[in-house]
Image (spheres, rainbow, N blue to C red):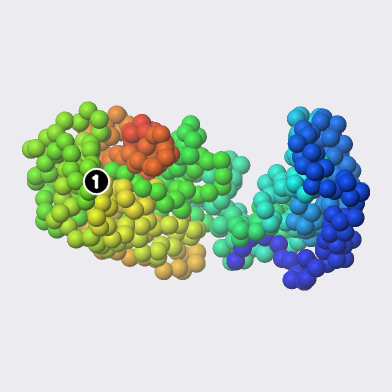
């Protein structure tokens, strides 16, 4: 069920096209009959297209469009744009679907071909004000100045096919509370905005609230509606979560200094999510729904598989040559890393030697890594039910060039911070507990299950992660966090990016965390400080 308003299903497009002044017919007749034959000749049109727009063209065309729309003549206003049909549907929708009583449009000062303007909409005794802008171009058909149609003419957050709609919300508003009953709002915790939207969509009618009346942007791509103005608040329902206000505040602060960064904090032994934070320009919950190559953090799962198959052990051999082959692809280590033919698995893990892990590929079947990820860590089965939308990773069958590089988190392997926080939690506790954000006591939903790790495998992995956190690639970030710590760094190369993505996963006591930062460089450079900050605040 989508959050948003109820809209009666009628032949609205037909009403707009024909009943709304017939702008479809007008456009056709206008194109044929307006002007003289000479004015509409191909030569005349071409000449106008080659003539630069003047400041007068921009000002007069833009102001005419605003004046016509503001007067309620939406058909005529749509005809002044480069695409009258979609413009007419959107402008008519402001009146018919959003029930806007009055549109006040105040032009600003033109700059080049752009004219900014202020919009004020009157809706059922309340008003919504915002700024946007238009651009004037020459019509490809006539060469005359027209307003370039874009949905942002109506509202800056609208996209193609979106409409403004006012009505009863499908789902009542919800109040999100943390594990101790403290209210968590999106103003204080910005990362929770998409979480709140999803919780409202999923649990609004189960949480005991009553619906609101809202002005929203109804998105054509089925994304959750964007609320612009609440006309009647309704009564919020109460949705409990496993979040911790303290951990959430620390997570928000930790990602705030880095672009496109995400972090998840989890409690080992329960699977309860203590915090989820994203610092992004959009509302995408990348921490839960991202699907990105995890780089060397994948070596946690690879190491578990090598131990489980008896191919080596934490103190067993894992030579670190200068290069290794993955099919026909040559794999290198980090710049400056010296070859170490006598390396153990623990040593290779701590220094993050790529070639050590890739060298095991000939001894493995194409589906071995995916089976370990699925059977022991619960990944890649699309059956996690956290309480909101989440992706539980992809570790597909790997052959050819992908077989070796998948062992170091490249190729077609895709994970997110939620997945990796869960991997660390499984290593820390030994048992797999599916991550949850909404307690199962609230809705009685079934959770995914997985075998988890043997006591021996889990102990060896903790040994390797502790070595990484105290004297390996994670030592700088984890410095000062105490003895009961573990970490794994990762850097994932992505085609077209100048710098690798930064990954870091770790634990302190029974608190685990994983972070990702796009183009953040080595794992310890950006993602490491994020994880260390949340562990320091919550441990």
Q: Which residue is at the front of the view, 50 or 393?
A: 50
Q: Which percent across, then down, holds residue 8?
A: 75, 69
Q: Which residue is at the front of the view, 402 or 262?
A: 402
Q: Quadrant of the C terminus?
A: top left
Q: Quadrant of the N terminus?
A: bottom right
Q: Which percent across, then down, holds residue 274?
A: 43, 48
The answer to whether residue 367 is above or below residue 194 is below
* Relative horizontal placement of residue 212, taking residue 255 as reference (left or right): right
Where disc 1 sits, the SS reads: strand
Residue shown at 26%/48% (left/top)? 405
Q: Quadrant of residue 20?
A: bottom right
The answer to whether residue 253 is above or below residue 455 is above
Q: Which residue is at the front of the view, 97 or 411?
A: 411
Q: Quadrant of residue 162?
A: bottom right
Residue shown at 39%/58% (left/top)? 392
Q: Quadrant of residue 521?
A: top left
Label 1: how many residues lie within 10 Å, few (<14), some (14-19) or many (20+)?
A: few
* Relative horizontal placement of residue 381, taking residue 260 as reference (left or right): left
* Relative horizontal placement of residue 83, taking residue 250 as reference (left or right): right
Residue 413 in view: yes
Residue furthest bottom as drawn: 10
Q: Which residue is at the front of the view, 349 or 154?
A: 154
**Across the whole image, how many numbered discs are drawn on residues?**
1
Residue shown at 56%/44% (left/top)? 282
Q: Which residue is mark 1?
A: 329
Q: Which percent across, then down, holds residue 420?
A: 34, 49
Q: Which percent across, then down, holds residue 140?
A: 75, 46
Residue 267 in view: no
Residue shown at 76%/61% (left/top)? 167
């Amino acid at each position: 069920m989508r959050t948003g308003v109820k809209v009666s299903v009628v032949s609205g497009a037909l009403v707009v096209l024909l009943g709304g002044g017939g702008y479809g017919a007008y456009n056709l007749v206008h194109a044929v009959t307006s002007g003289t034959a000479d004015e509409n000749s191909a030569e005349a049109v071409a000449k106008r297209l080659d003539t630069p727009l003047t400041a007068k063209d921009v000002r007069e065309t833009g102001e005419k469009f605003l004046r016509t729309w503001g007067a309620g003549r939406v058909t005529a206003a749509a005809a002044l744009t480069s695409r009258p049909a979609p413009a007419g549907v959107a402008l008519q929708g402001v009146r018919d679907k959003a029930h806007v009583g009055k549109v006040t449009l105040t032009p600003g000062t033109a700059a080049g071909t752009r004219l900014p303007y202020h919009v004020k909409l009157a809706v059922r005794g309340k008003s919504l004000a915002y700024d946007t802008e238009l651009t004037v171009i020459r019509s490809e058909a006539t060469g005359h100045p027209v307003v370039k149609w874009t949905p942002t003419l109506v509202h800056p957050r609208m996209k193609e096919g979106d409409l403004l709609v006012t009505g009863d919300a499908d789902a009542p508003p919800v109040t999100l509370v943390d594990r101790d009953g403290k209210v968590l709002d999106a103003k204080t915790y910005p990362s929770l905005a998409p979480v709140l939207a999803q919780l409202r969509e999923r649990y609004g009618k189960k949480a005991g609230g009553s619906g609101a009346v809202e002005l929203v942007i109804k998105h054509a791509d089925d994304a959750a509606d964007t609320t612009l103005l609440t006309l009647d608040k309704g009564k919020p329902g109460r949705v409990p979560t496993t979040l911790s206000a303290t951990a959430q505040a620390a997570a928000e602060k930790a990602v705030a200094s880095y672009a496109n960064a995400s972090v998840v904090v989890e409690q080992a032994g329960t699977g309860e999510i203590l915090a989820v934070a994203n610092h992004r320009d959009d509302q995408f919950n990348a921490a839960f729904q991202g699907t990105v190559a995890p780089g060397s953090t994948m070596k946690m799962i690879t190491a578990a598989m090598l131990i489980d198959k008896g191919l080596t052990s934490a103190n067993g051999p894992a030579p670190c040559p200068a290069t290794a082959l993955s099919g026909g692809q040559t794999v290198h280590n980090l710049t400056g890393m010296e070859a170490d033919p006598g390396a153990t698995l623990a040593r290779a893990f701590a220094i993050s030697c790529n070639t050590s892990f890739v060298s095991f590929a000939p001894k493995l079947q194409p589906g071995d890594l995916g089976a370990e990820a699925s059977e022991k860590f619960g990944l890649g089965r699309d059956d996690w039910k956290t309480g909101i939308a989440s992706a539980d990773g992809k570790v597909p069958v790997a052959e050819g060039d992908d077989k070796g590089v998948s062992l170091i988190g490249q190729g077609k392997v895709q994970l997110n911070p939620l997945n990796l926080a869960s991997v660390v939690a499984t290593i820390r506790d030994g048992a797999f507990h599916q991550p949850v954000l909404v307690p199962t006591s609230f809705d009685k939903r079934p959770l995914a299950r997985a075998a988890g790790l043997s006591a021996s495998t889990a102990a060896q992995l903790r040994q390797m992660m502790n070595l990484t956190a105290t004297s390996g690639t994670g030592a700088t970030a984890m410095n000062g966090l105490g003895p009961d710590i573990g970490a794994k760094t990762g850097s994932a190369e992505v085609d077209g990016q100048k710098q690798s993505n930064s990954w870091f996963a770790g634990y302190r006591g029974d608190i685990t965390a994983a972070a990702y930062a796009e183009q953040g460089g080595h794992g310890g450079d950006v993602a490491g400080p994020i994880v260390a900050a949340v562990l320091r605040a919550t441990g």
